[in-house]
Amino acid sequence: MYRSFSRCLLIFGFLLGGVPLTAQVVRTVPPLRVLPDLGQMTRRAGLIFTGTVTSITPIHATGSDTVESVQITFQVEQAVRGPRAGRTFTIREWTGLWTSGQRYRVGERLMLFLYPPSKVGLTSPVGGAAGRFAVNGNGQVLLSPVQVEVLKAAPARIPMDYKHRVAIRGFTSAVRRMAEE
């Protein structure tokens, strides 16, 4: 009798207010994240440069006006916007990015597209990991699958080889042209 009563309540509840019952069955689908193309990344970035990570220092919040962050210092090789080539340059990222897996390593060589620093001095890559391009010792930008899509959607054609590598010179030149537009 309990089962039949439960079924009746279920059917009755469905007929009167099916939304609460169906809401339990329907899964929430996360929204699609639209990545910017390289032209959009270039326009949004306040800092664009190629450099090597020389030091990483955690910054602990000491009061209500400071934020837990990580300070990353680079030796800048090429600069498109922001720092000057040949100098060291330091950025600060929110610790939450660091703990979510977007970490830097001393000795790592990168081309970065970073948002302009916030009021508290923090920045992060434009488009998340898409705005952080690894550069190898041969002067090639190593593209992740996401970054391949970012380049394919770019307003200017940037040639890449079958292993999804791009010469840093050509890449930087294309970015400079986009920055001037």
Image (spheres, rainbow, N blue to C red):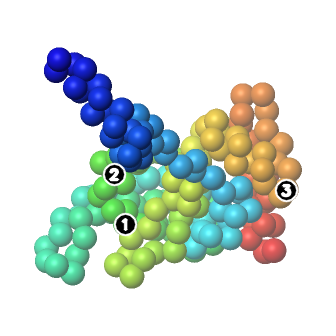
Q: Is residue 110 visible?
A: no
Alpha carbon separation for disc pair 2 and 3: 32 Å
Which numbered mark, 2 or 1, is in the foreground of this view? 2
**Hey, what amino acid is under mark 2?**
Trp
Which residue was labeled with disc 2?
A: 98
Q: Residue at x 39, y 82 (%)?
A: 119
Which tag, 2 or 1, sits closer to the chain's start?
1
Q: Quadrant of the C terminus?
A: bottom right
**Hey, what amino acid is under mark 3?**
Ala
Alpha carbon separation for disc pair 3 and 1: 31 Å
Residue 92, disc: 1
**Hey, what amino acid is under mark 1?**
Arg
Residue 156, disc: 3
Q: Residue at x 29, y 25 (%)?
A: 7
Q: Quadrant of the N terminus?
A: top left
Q: Is residue 29 visible?
A: yes
